[in-house]
Amino acid sequence: MNRQDLVQLIRDRKSYLCIGLDTDIQKIPKHLLSHADPIFAFNKAIIDATKDLCVAYKINTAFYECQGIRGWESLQRTVEYIPENIFTIADAKRGDIGNTSTYYAKTFFETYGFDSVTVAPYMGRDSVEPFLAFPGKWAIVLGLTSNAGSADFQQLPAGNARLYEKVMTTTASWGSADNIMFVVGATQAAAVADIRKLLPDHFFLVPGVGAQGGSLKDISEKGMNKDIGLLVNASRAVIYAGNGEQFAEDARAAALAYQQEMAGYIV
């Protein structure tokens, strides 16, 4: 999905909600365990209940990889089931060089058909550029993350800036606002306004709203640009809003609350 289509989708739906399908087989409703593929059965119900309220789904591959081949099959079924007009994110946090990164990109862009993949930039330019060679696809680069450990490296001084600022501005120069996004955690709202000044045109993928305590209001007021420029992710707060027979209806209610709040911030 290209930038123009993504921006139009956001404006049409008055939503910049990304729903994280971080599906833990230990947490899904017990009645689904009798299905041949319980993870996909859960994801299918969540997608059916929320697909008109969100603009993106993010699949954290760790929850699937740990299941071996069955997990990868669940992942593939899930990606194929997501409507084509909704942006898809492989939250895989890959980061290597040369042919290895090229094959990671092929895995998620060609084999599984994702629109984007999260990328760790620690190894530098040759770990990111292979992901930028696929037209219409996006690299979502880790910038300032929502976890407490972001202070260990990301927030260290680097000359007259912070390390995360150097990483983000340098990485931005390798591509464009049409194929690079950045992860900016919602729990880092105090820094978002300054990051937006550094990167006025790029989209930010924003985890940390909901269960992690980030404020949708703060991140929206400080992070929006002329194209909205945000994909705010909610995972547990939506998909585990309920755990009984009505889990999908509960997930829809949670997603609707986010969408309605977002609609109020879109001008």
Image: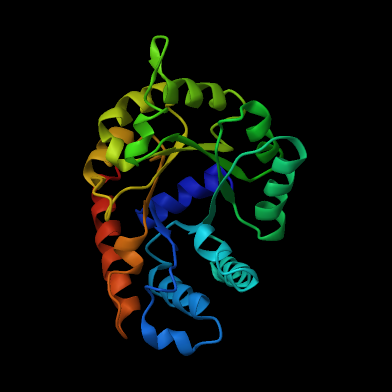
Left or right for 223, reference 127 = left
Q: Residue at x 32, y 31 (%)?
A: 192
Can the viewer see residue 261 in this picture? yes
Instruction: Left or right? Give the position of 237 relative to 111.
Output: left
Above or below residue 70? Residue 213 is: above
Above or below residue 159? Residue 45 is: below
Q: Is residue 103 left or right of residue 189?
A: right
Colour scheme in the image?
A: rainbow
Q: What residue lies at 58% left-to-right and 23% top-to-bottom?
A: 173
Point out residue 193 in the picture as x, y percentages from the top left corner: 30, 28
The residue furthest right is 99
User: Residue 134: which quarter of the image?
Assistant: top right
Q: Residue 88, located in which quarter of the rendered image?
A: bottom right
Residue 86 can be seen, yes or no: no
Q: Tell which of 175 and 52 is nearer to you.
A: 175
Above or below: residue 1 compared with residue 188: below
Where is residue 27? Give x, y as percent: 37, 73
- Residue 148 position, x and y percent, is 32, 39
Count of marks overlaid on the render: 0
Residue at image position (36%, 37%) is: 149
Q: Quadrant of the C terminus?
A: top left
Residue 233, x across and y down, in percent: 38, 52
Identify which residue is drawn at 43% across, 68% down.
24
